[in-house]
Image (cartoon, rainbow, N blue to C red):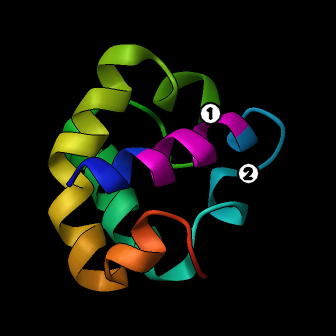
Amino acid sequence: MKYSYVLLATAGLAAAQQKFTDVVPKCSIECLTKAVKDGTKCSSIDDSACICEADNYRSIYTVGVNCVLQACGSDVAIGMST
């Protein structure tokens, strides 16, 4: 599960400059969209200011990690492939 932190951290840094959905693997978008909706009050997955707040970031991780690992596999979750 700690490997998903790598995916989210990398995506979080890049999302500050572009849409979050442009920097995460396509296999994770459905999981992360649901995690943002269910775990935060952020307006959308592309609300980078909101999803990068520490409490929201932790919540997205907690809610979405298992789904992302299942949907993408651990190699993608740690950013080794797309």
| Residue annotated with mark 2 | 19
Residue drawn at x 16%, y 64% as measured from the top left: 66
**Furthest-top residue in view?**
54
60 left or right of 70? Answer: right
The residue drawn where x is 42% and y is 77% is: 75
Which quadrant: the C terminus?
bottom right
**Camera-side residue of 46 and 72:** 72
Q: Position of residue 52 (x, y in %)?
A: 52, 26
State the residue in front, 30 or 80: 80
Residue 41 appears in the picture as rendered: no
Rendered-image quadrant of the N terminus: bottom left
In the image, is 80 to the left or to the right of 27? right
Mark 2 packing: few (<14 Cα in 10 Å), some, or many (20+)? some
Asked which quadrant contains residue 16, the reply is: top right
Question: Could you say which disc has been placed on residue 48 in the image?
Answer: 1
For the point 21% across and 38% down, which residue is it?
Answer: 39
In the image, the segment drawn in magenta is: 6-13
User: Does residue 79 sit above or below 1 in this rendering?
Assistant: below
Q: Secondary structure at mark 1?
A: helix
- The picture places residue 62, in percent across and down from the top left corner, at 17, 42
Tag 1 near tag 2, CB within 8 Å:
yes
Camera-side residue of 78 and 59:
78
Please tell me in which quadrant of the rendered image residue 68 appears: bottom left
Describe residue 77's horizontal placement relative to residue 64 as left or right: right
- Tag of residue 30: none
- Identify the residue at horizontal 17%, vertical 48% (top origin): 63
Q: Secondary structure at mark 2?
A: loop
**Amino acid type at mark 2:** Lys
